[in-house]
Image (cartoon, helix red, strand yellow):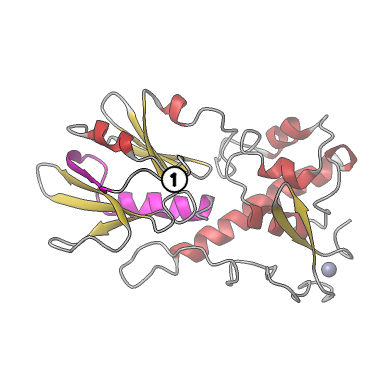
Amino acid sequence: MPELPEVESLRRYLVRNGIVGKTFVKVELENKPESAHGTGTIAGSKQAINQTISSIERRGKQLAMVLDDSVLGFHMGMTGQVHVLDPGEPSPRFTRAQFDLTDDHDSLRIALVDPRRWARIQHFGSLDHAFAGLGPDALDSAFTASHFVELLEGRTAQIKPLLLNQTVVAGIGNIYADESLHRVEISPARRVSDISKAELEKLFEAIRTSLEHALEYILSHPDDRGRPYIVDAYDDRMQLHRKPGSFCPRCEIPLVTLKFGGRTAYFCSNCQT
Ligand SMILES: [Zn+2]
């Protein structure tokens, strides 16, 4: 699933390819019915016609193109990617939507490519609506350790599910929560009320380090078309190898797993208490 670092690298890729300042002139959607699950709607794309993109924003795992008087929100679902196509290039396999954009100088064609069809494109009246319900972005420079401590202090929930709660902090995915907790030797099952303020401050720094390290890795490993690298849970971005039989990189005992609300945590029962 594209997480914060993947979505941020996608945002930068689109900016680098000159999408800001261009106007939507054509929107083509696939003919297939909407996802059987009902979550993969892309119908909002049509509202972007004749609108110009003034910026691309991100909060957590969500992307938003700010238009003249509205916002086009993108949630990449499980497998969503946006490709900038070369002139005349046929639609890639699994294309769900294709957009032609132009400005005074040149034109651009982009495609939403999404094999699993869970990605969503929705039209909103404002950026606040597009990002409604999301906590502060985990990599926002205005979001500080003391603000993070304030958000968590007084809570009694276990730390792992709280980190995954996007209404508290936006952008900490399952893998990055595990990486961060391992860095500061806190068990995913520990209750927030049993974690000191100093430990929470360290955890905040570990979250930043894990996400920034992953972003750097993705930016320095584009595919052969210069597109953002897409997530593979077992690469060098990770300190913890998320597969059965893997070991703690610090004390080298086997990692253990625990499920929180259907999400599997990998952690070291020796280092992390
Ligand atoms: Zn260990």
Residue at 74% of width from left, 30% of height from top?
150
Question: What residue did someone put label 1 on?
Answer: 36
Q: Position of residue 81 (x, y in %)?
A: 38, 55
171 vs 17, nearest the viewer? 171
Q: Position of residue 10 (x, y in %)?
A: 40, 53
Residue 32 to residue 43: above or below: below
Dot 1 falls on a residue whose secondary structure is loop
The quadrant holding residue 200 is: top right
Answer left or right for 246 relative to 15. right
Mark 1 residue crowding within 10 angstroms, few (<14) / some (14–19) / many (20+): few
90 vs 67, nearest the viewer? 90
Residue at 72% of width from left, 46% of height from top?
261
Q: Is residue 7 a member of the stretch shown in magenta?
A: yes
Q: Which residues are magenta?
A: 4-31
98 vs 4, nearest the viewer? 98
27 vs 223, nearest the viewer? 27
Q: Amino acid at mark 1?
A: Ala
Q: Position of residue 41 (x, y in %)?
A: 38, 40
Q: Does the beta carbon at disc 1 come under 8 Å from ligand 1? A: no
Quarter of the rendering occupied by the C terminus: bottom right
Which quarter of the frame holds ligand 1?
bottom right
Residue at 25% of width from left, 52% of height from top?
110
Residue at 84% of width from left, 49% of height from top?
189
Residue placed farthest to the left in the image?
Answer: 104
Answer left or right for 197 relative to 115. right
Q: Is residue 249 a member of the stretch shown in magenta?
A: no
